Amino acid sequence: QAAELEQMVSAALTLADQVDAAYASALTALAVPDPQPGPSPTPPDPNQPAPTRSQQGRDTAVRNSRGGRMRNGGQHDDEDANNQGDWLGNGVPGEHADTPGVRPWHYQGDSDNEGSGPHAQRSPTLEDYANHEAATLAADGFSPWWPDAAENLHHYLGNTGDPQSMNVDKMLADQPDLSNKTSNKVTTMAEKAVDKAQESGATGPVTYPFTTAWDSTYATTQNWFYATGGYNYATDGTVTVYPPSDDNPEWTYKYDYRVHTADRYNWDGDKSTMIFNQKITDKQLQELHQAGLAQEYDLVGESSVQHGSG
């Protein structure tokens, strides 16, 4: 037993030395990163980091494995919640209507190409413990430049599996692409509300509640790309339509809305990415989930109320 213990300690020290050497190199590189990483296109081009977390190939609004759903507040029903479309409710006379909310997005479970399977499906090894420590050091190292990515990785390594919030206001400010996509969807709903008000023969302001379907997109900055990769988004709000008046011969509208985001923070064993010239594989990190040292979780978020008119 003493000989076996001595051999285990020796192996652990050797592995620790190897990990220290690798991450010393990585942390040295972290000392001089580009403080303003440029946005990557959607999807990223070959010069930008490749998707690492089951985010590749999601060209449709909702996939079976990651179906977005909107909350049924009595305003709409749909047999296939994964294919829930945009919804415009009945008009309420005046300038106020209740905001309908969205049906929460739900992760549909791991598949062959997505996720790491059951948590703690095997006992951890010395290599798992070393990789956990190395990942923690890496998250600490890049947090000044990629704070949200570091926070999400730390939450994964914390091993609770609890949902983690997404700072949607910051996502909108950092990513004009997301802001444009959501405002365009809301504008489309506002134009439909105007058509509906005209058809009804409204002679005064009418307010319509609305929701837009869950859709998917890729993050366009390195911070958010490493934090979530691809993710889902939807909106809910109200549109108030105003008929022509003596002062304005045109139909006009104003709207208030919120942006909702959601994703599953998980790993696929066959993907990898380069971070500061260091190859980081999904397999290294997903094995921590399988060994019970880290745990995949849901990401959810909601913005403050946004405004617009037309």
Image: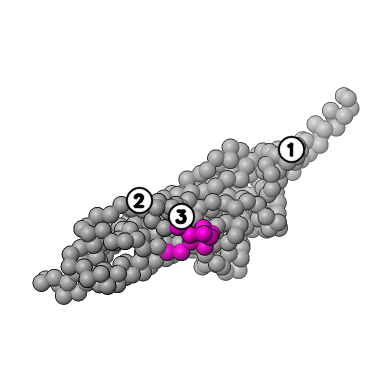
Q: Main secondary structure of the magenta part?
A: loop
Badge 1 element: loop
Q: Which residues are magenta?
A: 77-86
Label 3: which residue?
A: 70
Image quadrant assignment for residue 20: top right
| Residue 273 image position (x, y, % from top left) | 64, 58
The amino acid at mark 3 is Met
Q: Looking at the image, what colour scheme do you see?
A: one colour
Residue 304, disc: 2
**In this orientation, which residue lies closer to the viewer: 149 or 58?**
58
Q: Residue furthest bottom?
A: 249
Residue at position x 67%, y 55% from top?
A: 111
Q: Which of the two labelled residues, at mark 1 and mark 3, occupies the earlier sequence position? A: 3
Q: Quadrant of residue 125?
A: top right
Residue 112: numbered disc: none
Residue 230: x and y in percent read 54, 59
Q: Amino acid at mark 2?
A: Ser
**Which residue is rendered at x = 63% and y = 44% of the image?**
135
Query: Which circle, 1 or 3, is nearer the viewer?
Result: 3
Q: Nearer the viewer, mark 2 or mark 1?
A: 2
Residue 169 appears anywhere in the view:
no
